[in-house]
Amino acid sequence: MKLSKYLKNNFLNLVLSMVVIVIINLMLISFKTNNQAIIGINFILIVGLIIHIIYDFERRKKFYNKFLNDLDLLDQKYLITEMIEKPNFYDGEILYDSLYEIDKSMAEKIKEYSLSIQDFKEYIEMWIHEVKLPLASINLMLHNHKELSDKKIVEQLKRIDDDVEQVLYYVRSENAEKDYLIKETELNKVISNVAMKNKDILLENNINFEVEVGNKKVLTDSKWLEFIVNQIVSNSIKYIRSGVEHYIKITAEENNKSVILKIYDNGIGIEKSDLNKVFNKTFTGNNGRKVETSTGMGLYIAKQLCKKLGHKITIDSKESEFTEASILFNKNDFFEVRKKSK
Amino acid sequence: MKKILIIEDDTSISSELKDLLDNAGYEGIIIKDFESSFEEIKKENPDLILLDINIPKLNGEMLLQKIRKESNVPIIMVTSKNTEADEVLSMSYGADDYITKPYNPTILLLRINNIFKRMENKNDVLTYNDLTLDPKKGIIKNGKEEFILTKNEMIIFIFLLSNRGNIVTRDDLMTDLWNNDSYINDNALNVNISRLRTKLKDFGYEDAIETRKGQGYILK
């Protein structure tokens, strides 16, 4: 808060005070008051005015400087009412009370929305569990009644299941609350589940599936990782390149700081200009236009989940040659130490 | 015949599950009254229980805890709840396995079979007529001769052997191989079967593995 601006703001007040002082002087002169008394009175008037200005300026400065400073420091600006003290001047009090009211009503509104998002999320999760029942039922029916069974039906069922899972993980990835559980997980197990899920479509398309990850373990949520790896493998299957023997190769590297899981395919690859956009929401790019079922959500969700779990996911590719996705898992020293001390 | 209890409130799933188990040579029993599920379990005295988590009255996790207080009967949780937390919780309550819906029916049967195998804790030596099979060493032999079976040949032979006399589809064989982390393709399966046939022929069992066109294989 600057004094010059404050004075400018109170210009009318000052002019009025000056006019009053001039009138008092005129009256004193016309009453033939003794000169010394006039000087004394003027001294008191002017000093009084200055003291008043300084006092008023200082208490405002104290409040507003703290207010602006705190506001600047705060990440969530609406928390300002928790930081400042109620000022001791009238308009300040009004401001303070109003801010408090505004904040309260905004907090209520936010609460309302977050509850309704929470409700929606719960409903989606419940719905997904519900829709899995008929899926399980049809799977069993097709197995029990081989005469009904057809590779095409099984494939379409898998598509439904994949799409449903995508919704589930989208909801989970967008949600602020922590609904994952990090524990030591064998990469082999996760990959085995993904392989089994995609077995029919891999065999149908003559894609060789090679896995060399040894018995490496990582700290992750196995269900989330399974979804992430499934997204990548599904893409590899979707974008195979004709004229070559297709393969997907999964390997893992380990050093003392991290484990890197690599999923390599010799598919159509990604154009250089598209490469840094593949994790963008709803980005489909040139490849997406070649395949009907591209939503541009799979890798976006995979990236969001990785962020939450603390893994780093990257994709490297060369058009008409290969695509390689890498997921980096940090080793947790604390976890290692605890394991050793057991 | 092994008795398997199905605790599942979706009637379509439970009746298909019963068919699946019956066809696989087990006796599937469906629990209908969830009010007294615990008493019914005690009455039926099953060899294994397939337990859903989302069942009416006492939920699956609570029922699991209650059963574990009195019995060590193997329990596989079969559920559409697919979070890590649900699985960890169920396993800590003493479930033997955890499968999420929708599942591959062949995998469910393999898991059931695994649990029974683990329980019986046989010394792992299987026999086919005068041949004995040692999966750990990867060896097949009779009194005179001994051959090495590769991992894939061993998986295929054990699967055929445990379904001896019944038709085994290529898909079932593939599922079992992939379930054991052998991600082989159709050609490799053909090669493995023909190599297995050659080895059996050397023991004098020509045509032991018969091809049923359009259906699969059968071990005589």
Image (tube, rainbow, N blue to C red):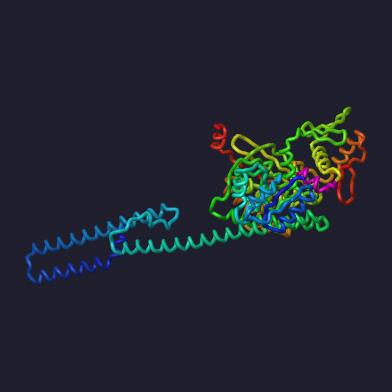
Q: Main secondary structure of the magenta part?
A: helix
| Location of residue B54 in the rendering, given as x and y in whole percent from the top left corner | 63, 54
**Residue A296 drawn above or below residue B163:** below
Residue nearest the observer in this picture, A205 or A27: A205
Q: Which residues are magenta?
A: B166-178
Q: Residue lying at the far top in this picture: please name it.
A: B144
Q: Is A74 left, or right, of A223 in this rendering?
A: left
User: Of all residues shown, which one is farthest toward the front?
Assistant: B43
* Left or right of residue A27: residue B83: right
Asked if residue B196 is positioned above or below residue B61 in the image, the reply reads above
Q: Is residue B145 visible?
A: yes
Question: Residue A147: x and y, percent?
Answer: 83, 57
Q: Quadrant of residue B183?
A: top right
In this image, B180 relative to B39: left or right?
right
Which percent across, then down, holds residue A8? 30, 64
* Residue B137 highlighted magenta (yes or no): no
Residue A18 pos. (x, y %): 21, 67
Please say whether residue A280 is visible from this viewpoint.
Answer: no
Closer to us: B145 or A74: B145
Q: Which residue is at 38% across, 61% downward?
A: A100
Q: Nearer the viewer, residue A7 or B175?
A: B175
Looking at the image, which residue is at 54% across and 37% down?
Answer: A334
Screen quadrant of the N terminus of chain B: top right
Which quarter shows the C terminus of chain B? top right
Residue name at image x 90 percent, y 44 percent: B210
Magenta region includes residue B170? yes
